[in-house]
Image (tube, rainbow, N blue to C red):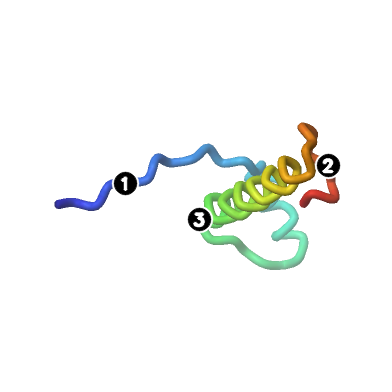
Amino acid sequence: MAAKKKAKKEVLVVGSKVKAYIKSKKLMCAGDLMEGLSEKVYSCIDEAIVRTKNNKRSTIRPHDL
């Protein structure tokens, strides 16, 4: 049986801004960096959601990150 493909998530970062920042540091970025960075952002947000719910709130705050 073939492995099921994960549904591709929407990229949450502004690629041009990230690339400009990296370029300002005299580095280059790989073509798939935005997808990897976006996965990190999803993970961070998911953890903040759990923390927010555990604290019986409905608003995610900076300290939840």
Q: Residue at x 75, y 55 (%)?
A: 21
Earlier in the chain: of badge 2 and badge 1, it is 1
Which residue does the image show at 54% across and 56% down from the upper left? Answer: 36
| Horizontal and vertical percent position of residue 23 | 71, 59
Find the residue positioned furthest to the left: 1
- SS class of the residue under badge 1? loop
Instruction: Give the amino acid at mark 3.
Output: Gly
User: How far is mark 2 from mark 3, CA to CA?
Assistant: 32 Å
Is 61 rendered above or below residue 22? Answer: above
Closer to the observer: label 2 or label 1?
2
What label sits on residue 61 in the rendered view? 2
Q: Mark 2 touching mark 3, by CB under 8 A?
A: no
- The reply to whether discs 1 and 3 touch (Cβ–Cβ < 8 Å) is no
Closest to the observer: 36 or 22?
36
Q: Quadrant of residue 6?
A: top left
Amino acid type, label 1: Lys
Q: Which mark is residue 5?
A: 1
Q: Earlier in the sequence, mark 2 or mark 3?
A: 3
Question: Residue 20, position in %: x, y?
Answer: 72, 52
**30 is higher (above) or lower (below) than 57:** below
Residue 31, percent from left and from top:
50, 55
**Label 1 Cα neighbours within 10 Å, binned few <14 / some 14-19 / many ≥20:** few
Q: Quadrant of residue 37?
A: bottom right
Q: Secondary structure at mark 3?
A: loop
Q: Is residue 4 left or right of residue 24?
A: left
Q: Which residue is mark 3?
A: 31
Q: Residues within 10 Å of mark 2 (few under 14, many from 20)?
A: few
- Residue in view at x 14 percent, y 52 percent: 1
Q: Amino acid at mark 2?
A: Arg
Question: Residue at the bottom extreme?
Answer: 26
Which secondary structure lies at badge 2? Answer: loop
Q: CA distance from mark 1 to mark 3?
A: 21 Å
